[in-house]
Amino acid sequence: MIHDLNFEHYPADLPWLVRWYYRYFFPRFAKNANRIATVSEFSKKDISTRYGIREDLIDVVYNGVNELYTSESEENTLTPIASVADGNPYFIFIGSLHPRKNLVTLFKAFDIFKNQDTANTKLVIAGEKKWWTSQIKWAYASMFFRKDVIFTGRCTVRELKHALSESIALVYVSYFEGFGIPILEAFACKTAVITSNVTSMPEIAGDAALLVDPFDKHAVAEAMQTVASSADIRKELIIKGLARVKEFSWQRSADLLWNSILKTIQQHND
């Protein structure tokens, strides 16, 4: 199983030893495997191209979404809960605070958005500062509206479910993902999604999210403004997201992986 090759495309995002391990061993793992499973068509093509593996030897096994990520009620999901942002509306990001999660652009985009904001909107960052680099730190320190950014640290599923369900939207503008599970979690929680138009994210989101250039802070800010100002657009995205997330489940993942294992056994017997 190879989830993605982010370490091949953005090696500088990883510590030297981790980068060396991935880039030295993974091509060897891939070429010695009978079959490879990966989590998206994007990663399948990437692995095939980068490592010279025939596509018919790579199986796509999509990730699923935790069934606990469901909306709390049928009420308007845009009313924030006090425990997250003291009763203020907010956008949310979920994930490890890693360079490729693109917090630098997100912070800049939020500053642009706040210049037009009259609702005291916050930005909630849910995740560990495991990869809190000097570049991310500087981007945050340089924000004019940094006091409106709330860091929750690592959250439980229940906490994330509440936080997602009550947010304006998930803003998930990574510049590289092999899949992007938070997109599905937001869909399941009846939450609008803004995500990137690169790598696997358009494949996973389908037509149920606003897709933006993750390197364009103005495009991200404009999408945030669009979602925050239009209840109709939020409602449309939520409806499409609920339909989209039904196409993914861990049972389907298990079935796809089992089929890949059966193919491997058949190859060996042949």
Image (cartoon, rainbow, N blue to C red):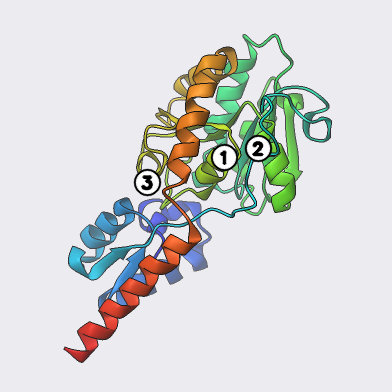
Determine crowd level at label 1: few under 14, some 14-19, many 20+ residues with C-alpha closer than 10 A: many
Which quarter of the image is occupied by the C terminus?
A: bottom left
User: Does the CB distance between marks 1 and 2 fall below 8 Å?
Assistant: yes
Q: Is residue 222 left or right of residue 56?
A: right
Mark 1 or mark 2: which comes first in sequence? 2
The residue closer to the viewer here, 117 or 257, is 257
Tell me the distance, in whole angstroms, between the alpha carbons under discs 3 and 1: 16 Å
Q: Residue at x 28, y 55 (%)?
A: 46
Q: Quadrant of residue 110?
A: top right
Decide which of tag 2 and tag 3 comes sooner along the chain.
Answer: 2
Please tell me whether mark 2 or mark 3 is closer to you in this view. 2
Residue carrying label 1: 186
The image's mark for residue 235 is none
For residue 164, the mark is: 2
Residue 33 visible to an observer of this rendering: no
Between circles 3 and 1, the one closer to the viewer is 1
First in residue order: circle 3 vs circle 1: 1
Question: What amino acid is labelled 3 in the image?
Answer: Ser
Q: Quadrant of the N terminus?
A: bottom left
Q: Where residue 148 appears, x then y in whole percent?
A: 74, 25
Identify the residue position indicated by label 3 in the image.
200
